[in-house]
C-alpha cells in the first residue's frame, strides 16, 4: 500500500435537512484511499443523500467534504474528481455506447479518445457493442457501460448508487464479483450505496450501516455480523435471536445472566452495554451457532455451554440446512439453522428440545433499545 | 417506495442560512419565463383589459372614445343579439355531440382495431389539416350543392322532409341552412375530438378488455363499464376542444349559412371590421368570453378532470 | 346469421371508416376540382377536365404573393413561439418558482379562448396604441396563440425525461451550458420538433385572428376568404391539393426512415 491519501474521502460533520426533515444527521466518516466502502441501509435512511453530497449533486446543510486534502464542499459536480454510477444507470439515450463512455473525456477537452475508450470497453467486455445505443443492450451490459463511463475518467473516487438494483438475482451475483474484480484491478476508492446486506458484505472491505440519517455501526463485514452493537444492526444484517436478561454477576471475563430461570454466560468483551449487577441487557446469538438436541439426549450435552429448553413449532427444510423455530420461555420464536449432516428424525414440530451453544458466540446489547429495530426492513425493500 | 431522502426532488427548497455562490441559479426560472410570459401578458392579458375598457366607452370613430362606464352596451348587445348567442351555443353543442358520436368509433378503431394500419389511418386523420381549412370548407359548397348527389339522396330518402319539419333545412336545400353550418362545424373540429379520444383510449391496457371478458362482461358491457369510463379524460378534453372554437366560429356560418344562421362570431366580426361600433363589439366579445369561461369551469369541475394542461 | 355476427363484431370498424370518409371527402373534392375548367367565377360545379390550373399555379394575381407571405409569417412565428415556449416549458418542469399557478393559467387560457375573442381584443389593443396593422401585428398575434401549444408539447417531453441524465452529465465534467447543449436539448428535441410543427401548422392555417389584425395585408387564408366572395380560382384547389400531397409524402418518408431504423434495431438485438 502506498501512503498516497488523495483518494481519501473525509466527511466532517455533514448533514442535510429539507425544511423540517433531517435526511442526514451530522456525520463524520473517513473512507481510506483504495478501499471498497459500502453504505448499507433501508430506503430513506440517508445513504443516497450522503453519496450525493460526495458527488456534489446535493449541498450539505452543514459540514465539509474533503477529497484527500482538498475541500470540495461547494464545488459543483463537474469540477470534482469524482464519478458516479447512477441508479438505473442514466445512460444518455441519444448517444451510442462509445460516445457515452467518451463523454467525460470529451468534456475535459481531450481530443484523441479512441484508444482509451476501446481499452475501457475491453475492461468491461463490451468491445463489440461500441456502436449500439443503450436501449439495445441488456441490463447487465448497460450496467457495465455505466461503470466504464465513470471509470474512464480515472476518478479519485467512484460512487455507486444501487448499481445492481435493476438486475435479476443471478446477474446481480455475477456483477458483484465483476465489480470487485474491477475495483481490485484499478485500485481506486469505491463508495457503494445499497440496501442489500448480502451485496454489501460480499463486496465491501468496510460497511457503514445507516438508519434514520445516522451511521449505526461501521466495520468489516465479519465484525458487523459477529459483533453487532445495536439491535438494528443485529436484526438488519442476517438474523439474531435476542433475549432480555438480567445480570446476575459480572466478575472477571464473563458476565453471568439470568433469563427465564436459566443461566447464560456472556464474554464481557462482547457486551456493548454497561454491565452492572442487577441491570438488564439483551443477549443475542446467531441462529447458525446453535445446536439442537432432543430433550431425551440432553444429558450428552457438554458442560459449559449456554442452554435453553423449548419445543419445536415449525421446521422448514431448505437443502443445505434445516431452519427450526423453537418456542422457549425466554423467546417465543427462537430461530435455529442446523446443517443437514446427521438429521435426527425426532426433530419435528412438537418435539421437546434443548438449544445449546458456545458462550463465546453470545453477544450483549443495551436493553434500552427497541428489540425489533431493523426486523423486516431488508425484505420491505423488494416490494 | 421512494422517500424524500432517497431521491430528493431536483430542486429541494433552499435551506436557510449562508448560501454558497453556486445557487445564484435561483433566478434562472424567472429569466426563462420572462420573455414568453411578457409576450402573453402584453398581447393576451392586456388586450383583454383594453377590451373590457372599450366595452364601457362611448363616442364615435371621428371624435374618439372615452371611458364613461356606459354599461348599457352590454344590455344593448344582449337584447339585440341574443338570437345569435343562442344559435352559437346550440350549433356548437350539436356539433360537439356529433363530433363525439362520429369521432369515438374512429378513435376506437385506431386505438384497438387498426393493427398495422394504425399509422396510416392516423395520417389520414391529420393530413387534411395541411390543406387550408377555408379551402376544405368551400368544398362543402360543392358537396351540399342544391342539385348534387347528397341532396338528391337525402330528398329521395325523405330525410329532408324530416329536417325541414325540424327547421334544420328549408325547402329542398341544405346549403344556407342550419344543417349545413352544423355539418361544417362538425367537419372542421372533428380531429380535435378524435386526437384526445385516441390518446386516452391508447393508454388503456388491452388486458383490461380480456379481464372484463373473463369476468363475464359481454363486449358492450365491457365498453360501457370499462372502456368508456377510462376514456373520460379524452371525452372531456375533446368536447372542450371542439365546443370552444365552434362557439366562436364565424367562418362556417358565413360560407355555408345564410343571414338566418349568423352566429355571435359573425356579429363581432361585422361590428369590429365593418360597422366599426367598437363598444358593442367589445361587449359582445366580453360576454362570449365570460360565458365560455363559466361553462368550461363548470364542466371541468363537474367532470372532475382538472389536469387538462 | 354469420353475416349478422360479422356485422356485430365489425360495427365499430364500419362506423370508424365512415367517419374517415367524412373527414377525407372534402380533400377528394378539392383534388378533383383542381382539374376543373369552371364556367364563370366560381369553382363549385364540375364542367370538364383540364390541367390548366396545374400548368399555371401562380396565374391568379396576388395568390402566390399571399402564399409566400403566409409561409414567411409561419416560419417566423414558429421560431418565435418555439423559442419562448421551450423556455417556459423548461422553467415549468425543471425549476421551482413563485406564481406557478398564475403562469399555468396564463398558458392555459389562450387555448380555452375562442379565437374571435382573442382576435377582437388584440385589435382593440393595436387600435388604442395606434399600431399600423400588417406583417408585424400578424406575427405578434401568431406567436401569442402558438406559444401555449408549444409549451404543452415540450412540457410533456421534458417531464418524461429522467433528471438523472442531466446529473450524470454534470458528474462527467459538463458545465451547465454543456449539459444543456449535449444532453438536455438533444433528448428534448422530439418534443420541441412536435411543438414547432404544431406552431407552423396553426400559424399557416390561421384565419380568424389574422383577419382582424392584418389591416390591408393579405395572407393565403385571407386570399381564399376574399375569393369566396369575389370568385374562387381553380389555383386555390391546386395549392390545397399540393399541400396535402407534400404533407402526406413527407410523413410517409419519415415513417419509412423510422421503419428502417426499427428494423436495424431489431436485427441488432437478434444478432447480439
Image: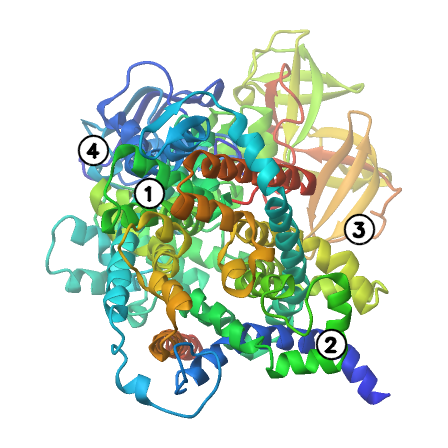
Chain under numbered label 4 = A
The secondary element bearing badge 1 is classed as helix
Both marks 4 and 1 on one chain? no
The x and y percentages for residue C187 are 34, 55
Q: Is residue C223 left or right of residue B211?
A: left
Who comes first in sequence, dot 2 or dot 1? 2
Name the residue beneath numbered marker 4: A5
Please name whichever residue, B158 or C152, is drawn nearer the observer in this view of the structure.
Answer: B158
Mark 2 vs mark 1: in front = 2
Residue A208: x, y in percent?
Answer: 44, 32
Rendered image: mark on residue C11: 2
Residue occupied by mark 3? A344
Q: Are marks 2 and 4 in contact (CB under 8 Å)?
A: no
Q: Nearer the viewer, residue A200 or B301?
A: B301
Residue drawn at x 17%, y 35% is A4
Please report, as a chain letter, where disc 1 is located: C
Q: Nearer the viewer, residue A32 or A48?
A: A48
User: Residue at 55% across / 72% down in the picture?
Assistant: C23
- Above or below residue A274? Residue C220 is below
- Outermost residue on the right side: it is A350
* Element type where label 4 sits in the image: loop
Cα distance in 3D space between marks 4 and 1? 27 Å
**In the rendered image, residues at marks 4 and 3 fall on the same chain:** yes
- What is the chain identity of the residue bearing mark 3? A
Amino acid at each position: 500500500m502506498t501512503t498516497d491519501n488523495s483518494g481519501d474521502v473525509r466527511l466532517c460533520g455533514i448533514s442535510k435537512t429539507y425544511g423540517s426533515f433531517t435526511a442526514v444527521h451530522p456525520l463524520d466518516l473517513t473512507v481510506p484511499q483504495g478501499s471498497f466502502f459500502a453504505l448499507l441501509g433501508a430506503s430513506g435512511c440517508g445513504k443516497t443523500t450522503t453519496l450525493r453530497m460526495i458527488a456534489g449533486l446535493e449541498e450539505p446543510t452543514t459540514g465539509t467534504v474533503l477529497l484527500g486534502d482538498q475541500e470540495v464542499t461547494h464545488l459543483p459536480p463537474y469540477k470534482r474528481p469524482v464519478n458516479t454510477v447512477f441508479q438505473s444507470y442514466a445512460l444518455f439515450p441519444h448517444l451510442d455506447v462509445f460516445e457515452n463512455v467518451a463523454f467525460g473525456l470529451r468534456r475535459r477537452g481531450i481530443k484523441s479518445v479512441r484508444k482509451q475508450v476501446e481499452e475501457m470497453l475491453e475492461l468491461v467486455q463490451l468491445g463489440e457493442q461500441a456502436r449500439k445505443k443503450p436501449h439495445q443492450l441488456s441490463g447487465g451490459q448497460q450496467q457495465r457501460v455505466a461503470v466504464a463511463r465513470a471509470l474512464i475518467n480515472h476518478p479519485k473516487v467512484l460512487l455507486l448508487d444501487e448499481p445492481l438494483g435493476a438486475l435479476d438475482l443471478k446477474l446481480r451475483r455475477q456483477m458483484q464479483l465483476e465489480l470487485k474484480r474491477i475495483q481490485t484491478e484499478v485500485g481506486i476508492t469505491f463508495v457503494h450505496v445499497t440496501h442489500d446486506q448480502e451485496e454489501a458484505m460480499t463486496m465491501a472491505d468496510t460497511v457503514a450501516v445507516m438508519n434514520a440519517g445516522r451511521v449505526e455501526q461501521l466495520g468489516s463485514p465479519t465484525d458487523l455480523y459477529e459483533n453487532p452493537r445495536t439491535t438494528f444492526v443485529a436484526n438488519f444484517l442476517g438474523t439474531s435471536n435476542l433475549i432480555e436478561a438480567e445480570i446476575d454477576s459480572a466478575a472477571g471475563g464473563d458476565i453471568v445472566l439470568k433469563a427465564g430461570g436459566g443461566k447464560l454466560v456472556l464474554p464481557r468483551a462482547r457486551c456493548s452495554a454497561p454491565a452492572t449487577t442487577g441491570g438488564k441487557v439483551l443477549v443475542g446469538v446467531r441462529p447458525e451457532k446453535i445446536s439442537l438436541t432432543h430433550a431425551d439426549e440432553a444429558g450428552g450435552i457438554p458442560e459449559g455451554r449456554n442452554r435453553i429448553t423449548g419445543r419445536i413449532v415449525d421446521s422448514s427444510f431448505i437443502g443445505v440446512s434445516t431452519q427450526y423455530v423453537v418456542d422457549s420461555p425466554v423467546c417465543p420464536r427462537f430461530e435455529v439453522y442446523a446443517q443437514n449432516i446427521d438429521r435426527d428424525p425426532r426433530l419435528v414440530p412438537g418435539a421437546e428440545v434443548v438449544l445449546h451453544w458456545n458462550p463465546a458466540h453470545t453477544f450483549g446489547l443495551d436493553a434500552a433499545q427497541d428489540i425489533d429495530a431493523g426486523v423486516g426492513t431488508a425484505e420491505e425493500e423488494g416490494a | 417506495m421512494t422517500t424524500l431522502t432517497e431521491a430528493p426532488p431536483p430542486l429541494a427548497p433552499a435551506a436557510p442560512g449562508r448560501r454558497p455562490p453556486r445557487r445564484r441559479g435561483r433566478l434562472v426560472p424567472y429569466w426563462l419565463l420572462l420573455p414568453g410570459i411578457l409576450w402573453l401578458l402584453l398581447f393576451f392579458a392586456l388586450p383583454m383589459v383594453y377590451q373590457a375598457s372599450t366595452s364601457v366607452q362611448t363616442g364615435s370613430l371621428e371624435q374618439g372614445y372615452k371611458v364613461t362606464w356606459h354599461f348599457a352596451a352590454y344590455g344593448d348587445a344582449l337584447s339585440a343579439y341574443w338570437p345569435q348567442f343562442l344559435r352559437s351555443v346550440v350549433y356548437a353543442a350539436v356539433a360537439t355531440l356529433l363530433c363525439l358520436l362520429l369521432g369515438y368509433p374512429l378513435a376506437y378503431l385506431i386505438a384497438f382495431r387498426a393493427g398495422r394500419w394504425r399509422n396510416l389511418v392516423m395520417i389520414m386523420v391529420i393530413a387534411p389539416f395541411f390543406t387550408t381549412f377555408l379551402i376544405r370548407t368551400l368544398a362543402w359548397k360543392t358537396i351540399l350543392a342544391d342539385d348534387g348527389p347528397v341532396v338528391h339522396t337525402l330528398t329521395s330518402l325523405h330525410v329532408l322532409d324530416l329536417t325541414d319539419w325540424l327547421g334544420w333545412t328549408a325547402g329542398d336545400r341544405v346549403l344556407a341552412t342550419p344543417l349545413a353550418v352544423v355539418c361544417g362545424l362538425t367537419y372542421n373540429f372533428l380531429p380535435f375530438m378524435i386526437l384526445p379520444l385516441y390518446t386516452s383510449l391508447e393508454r388503456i391496457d388491452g388486458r383490461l378488455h380480456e379481464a372484463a371478458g373473463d369476468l363475464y362482461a359481454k363486449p358492450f358491457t365491457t365498453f360501457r363499464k370499462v372502456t368508456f369510463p377510462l376514456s373520460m379524460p379524452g371525452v372531456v378534453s375533446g368536447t372542450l376542444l371542439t365546443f370552444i372554437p365552434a362557439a366562436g366560429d364565424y367562418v362556417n356560418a358565413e360560407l355555408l349559412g345564410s343571414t338566418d344562421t349568423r352566429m355571435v362570431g359573425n356579429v363581432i366580426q361585422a361590428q369590429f371590421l365593418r360597422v366599426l361600433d367598437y363598444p358593442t363589439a367589445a361587449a359582445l366579445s366580453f360576454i362570449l368570453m365570460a360565458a365560455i369561461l363559466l361553462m368550461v369551469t363548470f364542466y371541468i369541475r363537474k367532470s372532475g378532470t382538472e389536469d387538462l394542461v | 346469421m354469420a353475416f349478422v355476427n360479422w356485422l356485430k363484431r365489425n360495427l365499430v370498424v364500419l362506423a370508424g371508416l365512415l367517419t374517415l370518409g367524412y373527414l377525407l371527402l372534402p380533400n377528394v373534392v378539392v383534388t378533383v376540382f383542381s382539374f376543373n375548367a369552371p364556367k364563370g367565377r366560381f369553382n363549385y360545379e364540375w364542367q370538364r377536365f383540364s390541367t390548366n390550373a396545374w400548368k399555371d399555379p401562380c396565374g391568379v394575381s396576388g395568390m402566390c404573393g399571399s402564399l409566400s407571405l403566409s409561409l414567411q409569417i409561419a416560419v417566423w412565428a414558429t421560431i418565435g413561439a418555439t423559442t419562448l415556449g421551450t423556455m417556459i416549458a423548461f422553467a415549468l418542469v425543471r425549476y421551482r418558482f413563485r406564481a406557478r399557478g398564475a403562469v399555468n393559467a396564463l398558458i392555459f387560457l389562450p387555448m380555452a379562448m375562442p379565437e374571435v375573442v382573442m382576435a377582437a381584443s388584440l385589435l382593440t389593443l393595436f387600435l388604442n396604441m395606434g399600431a399600423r396593422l400588417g406583417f408585424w401585428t400578424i406575427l405578434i398575434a401568431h406567436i401569442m396563440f402558438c406559444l401555449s401549444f408549444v409549451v404543452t408539447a415540450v412540457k410533456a417531453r421534458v417531464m418524461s425525461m429522467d433528471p438523472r441524465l442531466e446529473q450524470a452529465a454534470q458528474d462527467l465534467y459538463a458545465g451547465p451550458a454543456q449539459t444543456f447543449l449535449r444532453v438536455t436539448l438533444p433528448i428534448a428535441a422530439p418534443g420541441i420538433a412536435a411543438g414547432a410543427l404544431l406552431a407552423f401548422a396553426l400559424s399557416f392555417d390561421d384565419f380568424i385572428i389574422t383577419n382582424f389584425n392584418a389591416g390591408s395585408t393579405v395572407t393565403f387564408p385571407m386570399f381564399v376568404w376574399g375569393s369566396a366572395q369575389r370568385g374562387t380560382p381553380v389555383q386555390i384547389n391546386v395549392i390545397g391539393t399540393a399541400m396535402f400531397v407534400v404533407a402526406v409524402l413527407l410523413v410517409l418518408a419519415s415513417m419509412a426512415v423510422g421503419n428502417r431504423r426499427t428494423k436495424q434495431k431489431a436485427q441488432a438485438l437478434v444478432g447480439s
